[in-house]
Image (spheres, rainbow, N blue to C red):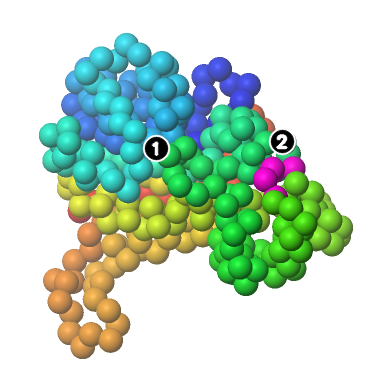
């Protein structure tokens, strides 16, 4: 959830379109898989007023604590669970819930995480090179930066950061760590800044952006979690239920797009299979033919939403 730090209401990205696409109804059961500050969850609870239920999941314990404080007062209509959204089926089963009417996930890093220097997500703040969304995860970004072989580090930065200069950056990191560990965000950001040509992306993004993204994705196994979550989400949806996914970079958006489009196809059998074995029926209806983007008004109030892409489907 990319929230504006100064916004006391903590309105999440593309709140209006998300709530409209979810089509919340009284008595419905909904899952906010990345509950964060509780912005989506609050709106869902209001739209499903009366007896609607929201299960809010987040594997960042601090985010879950904020949600609990902000959503206090909804009583038994709100269930909060510290868990990765990929574990949605297990968590629902734990609470005696079979299928649900809607699911939303916001795949971005929250402004709370970015603004807290001790979390290590921001290259503009001095802090430990951590980047763990769940502090119980065994490996930090510093562990990867200092332990991976140069070739493996270059591959990671290229694969998850789509950084064309990955080999140059990995070479510079390998040379620097021979003199001492790289343990802070500022150290790494400055090293990359000196490595990347000044003309490269000077008018757009900080030269460390893609490398930091790659490390964060690797530390938190974000793509793996998303790939495990999507089929689970489809299975736990009731017919007519909806899934909304807000992505913030092309890697995760591509995973969502390909899954949604595959579900919407009349035949999902492997191409090499001679005859259709999936009964030739689509599993979902695409609610967004193309990804929706934030409005100009929203971007004016929250520039961090600029890369957001919203996709949604309805289960048939």
Res 158 visible: no
In the rendered picture of this protein, how many numbered marks are placed on residues? Answer: 2
- Seen as rendered, the residue at the extreme front is 179
Asked if the magenta segment contains residue 307, the reply would be no
Residue in front for this viewpoint, 130 or 197:
130
Q: Residue at x 54, y 47 (%)?
A: 140
Residue bearing the label numbered 2:
125
Tell me: residue 190, above or below residue 111: below
- Residue, disc 1: 59
Residue 138 percent coordinates (x, y) = 45, 47
- Quarter of the image for residue 227 reads bottom left
Q: As drawn, is 50 to the left or to the right of 251? A: left
Query: Between marks 2 and 1, how big is the CA–CA gap?
Result: 23 Å
Residue drawn at point x = 52 percent, y = 24 percent: 10
- Magenta residues span 182-186
Label 2: element kind: loop
Q: Is residue 183 magenta?
A: yes
Q: How dense is the environment of label 1, judged by Cα within 10 Å: few (below 14), some, or many (20 and up)?
A: many
- Residues 11 and 215: in front is 215
Q: Position of residue 48 (x, y in %)?
A: 27, 25
Q: Quadrant of residue 50 in the image? A: top left
Instruction: Please indicate, yes or no, whether residue 119 appears anywhere in the rendered image.
Output: yes
Residue farthest toward the right in the current orientation of the protein: 198
Q: The residue tagged with tag 1: helix, strand or loop?
A: loop
Q: Residue at x 26, y 26 (%)?
A: 79
Task: Determine the residue positioned at 59% across, 59% down.
Answer: 147
Mark 2 crowd level (few <14, some 14–19, many ≥20, 10 Å Cα): some
| Position of residue 182 in the picture relative to residue 2 (left or right) | right
Q: Main secondary structure of the magenta part?
A: loop
């Amino acid at each position: 959830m990319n929230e504006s730090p100064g916004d006391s209401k903590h309105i999440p990205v593309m709140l209006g379109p998300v709530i409209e696409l979810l089509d919340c109804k009284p008595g419905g059961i909904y899952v906010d898989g990345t509950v964060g500050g509780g912005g989506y969850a609050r709106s869902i609870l209001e739209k499903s007023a009366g007896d609607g239920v929201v299960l809010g999941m987040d594997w960042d314990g601090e985010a879950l604590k904020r949600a609990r404080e902000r959503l206090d007062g909804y009583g038994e209509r709100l269930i909060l669970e510290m868990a990765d959204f990929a574990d949605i089926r297990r968590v629902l089963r734990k609470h005696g819930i079979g299928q649900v009417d809607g699911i939303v996930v916001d795949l971005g890093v929250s402004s709370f995480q970015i603004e807290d220097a001790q979390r290590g997500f921001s290259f503009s703040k001095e802090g430990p090179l951590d980047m763990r969304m769940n502090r119980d995860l065994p490996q930090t970004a510093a562990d990867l930066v200092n332990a991976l072989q140069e070739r493996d580090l270059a591959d990671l930065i290229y694969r998850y950061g789509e950084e064309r200069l990955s080999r140059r950056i990995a070479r510079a990191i390998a040379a620097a760590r021979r003199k001492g560990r790289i343990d802070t965000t500022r150290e790494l950001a400055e090293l990359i800044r000196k490595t990347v040509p000044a003309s490269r992306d000077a008018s757009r993004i900080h030269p460390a952006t893609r490398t930091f993204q790659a490390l964060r994705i690797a530390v938190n196994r974000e793509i793996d979690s998303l790939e495990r979550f999507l089929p689970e989400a489809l299975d736990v949806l009731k017919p007519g239920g909806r899934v909304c996914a807000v992505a913030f970079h092309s890697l995760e958006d591509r995973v969502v797009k390909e899954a949604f489009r595959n579900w919407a196809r009349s035949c999902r059998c492997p191409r090499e299979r001679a005859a259709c074995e999936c009964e030739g029926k689509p599993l979902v209806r695409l609610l967004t033919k193309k990804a929706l983007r934030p409005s100009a008004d929203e971007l004016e109030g929250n520039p961090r939403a600029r890369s957001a892409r919203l996709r949604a489907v309805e289960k048939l």
